[in-house]
Amino acid sequence: MTTASPNNHSFPDNSVGIVVPQTFVINEPLDLVCGATLPNYQLVYETYGALNSDASNAVLICHALSGDHHAAGYHSTTDATPGWWDHYIGPNKAIDTNRFFVVGVNNIGSCRGSTGPASINPDTQQAYGPDFPMVTCRDWVVTQAKLADMLGISQWAAIVGGSLGGMQVQQWAIDLPHRLRHAVIIASAPKLSAQNIAFNEVARQAIMKDPDFHGGRFLAHDTLPKQGLMLARMLGHLTYLSDDLMGSKFGRELRTGSLKYNYEVEFQVESYLRYQGEKFATKMNFDANAYLLMTKALDYFDPASEHGDDLVAALSHIQAESLVVSFTSDWRFSPARSLEITRALVQAGKRVTYTEVESEHGHDAFLLPNSYYEQLFSAYMNRIAAEFSA
Amino acid sequence: MKAHHLKAEFDLLLDWIPQGARVLDLGCGNGELLAYLNTHKRVKGVGLEMDALAIVGSINNGVDVIQADLNSSNLVELFGENAFDVVLTTQTVQAMQRPDQLIDSMITVGKRAIVTFPNFGYWRNRLQMIFEGKMPVSEALPHQWYDTPNTHLCTFSDFEQLCTDKNISIIEQRVLGKELGFVAQLVPNLFGEVALYHIEKGFGG
């Protein structure tokens, strides 16, 4: 089951090394919150470290909008970049794989191997495309609990996630309170604001208005809505950065010493954004339908709505202790939103630790190296580890 | 900001904490007090602290902590009324922008409060002022005038006057000092170096 080989010479000592994604096929129907049913589905996942004898050291990693199961390590010796959270997962890192058994899983509706819009619909033998049903955080919790069952994990030591991943952590704690001891909620929110939904809607319109989108059936037309996906990513990307960071990184620096008075790339920031958008739409080959679904899952998340908009009531049955982390320059999921979660947890009588990490990196900060973030994250994970090794 | 007396203060206030109480410690530092209260009284504690490294210290001590600036935090909005059995602040109130407002919110979010602070009216401090013409520097007040965080130093009498003005009941006062215990207790405003006040909302006010 352990898929990491920590002693690979071509990787740093504190890397989990080469990892091999696994596939878990669930041959039973899944009733989704939206009312639709998937006849069957599969989950692609990775694990790092070893599950201990009483299965008390398992940590689930929930990914964000465009993330996946590949949270740490490398897929081959020629792999240039490690998993998306490699800085925080590995031997002697914050989530220490010498002590924890870590599971990364790709959400259904995404496009990295778990069942999603690019998968074949068994009813039609065609790709689902735009027919793939809407998925929500609640559906993800159901599917991830199946994975936990299969792995023999009745209770996670911790479930950890940033951004949309942090919403899944909250959903887990609410829906299956007995199945996790700690909820680590990073750069997240109890629900999206109107502004956040608006950003998502612009991203969706960019994709859906691309002439190559073909109502979501672009694969049947042998094409991809690259322009739309690129625009969506450019918009998303700039909301993940802070004004200060863009100022210090690019300022008004010109690409070629002088203004040209045309619509070519003139400012460095334009060049950067176009590069990020193109990389996402082409090299990373992110499925446009999956991007749409992920943004909708973000929009739908609102656990308090089922409790008369009372977040305290929504959190009143959770059993996990929580760590809530925000970043000072994150305006997409601002510290005020994390404080809402914290305040509700406190008022619901739950154990919670909250901290606001000083960073200029905006929403992206939760993925990046930061000395204080590492220290507090490690300290909290140590506390969790002390509970099962004591 | 916090001086040497902490351990002695912890011992002195311990019997003001009910077993299993919900306790909020404002300016909890590394969480030593809450860890101590947890050991001795099995409290359900949470601390407020601004300093990042102290947050890590609190986590290491197994103490729940919320990072917040006491000067700008709205405790009532954060916790609600009567959310705690006891709200504490040790050696912090004198460094607040508005100690009076902090004390107000303490007895709103908590049923009772414990406030400890150094006595500016301690006789050695008075002597330094009178004979040396200098701001007092001592074990309890270790800072120089230019770098002290203690912008609102007061005497025990000042604090008690504030309580009277605000209709706050003083349940009990205890005093720490180098001088003989009973002498300090007789004239605390002169011989007490550090005071611990156990207070609650006054009645009928």
Image (cartoon, rainbow, N blue to C red):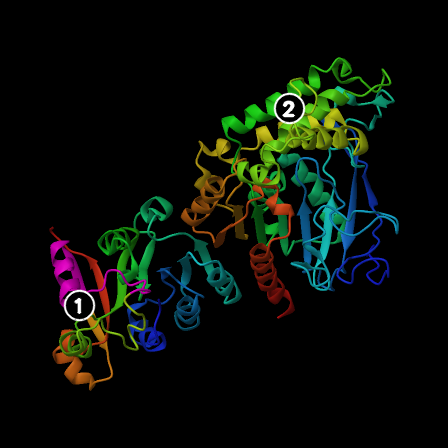
* Front residue of A306 and B12: B12
Residue A218 sits above or below residue B156 on the image: above
Which stretch did the figure color magenta? B146-170
Question: Horizontal and vertical percent for residue B68?
Answer: 41, 52
Q: Are marks 2 and 1 on the same chain?
A: no
Mark drawn on residue B155: 1
The residue at 28%/69% (across/down) is B16
Residue A48 sits above or below residue A386 on the image: above
Question: Horizontal and vertical percent for residue A5?
Answer: 84, 59
The residue at 65%/30% (across/down) is A254
Residue B25 sits above or below residue A336 on the image: below
Question: Horizontal and vertical percent for residue A373?
Answer: 57, 54
Q: Secondary structure at mark 2?
A: loop
The residue at 69%/53% (across/down) is A87
Mark drawn on residue A259: 2
**Viewport quadrant of the N terminus of chain B:** bottom left
Indicate the chain on which mark 1 is placed: B
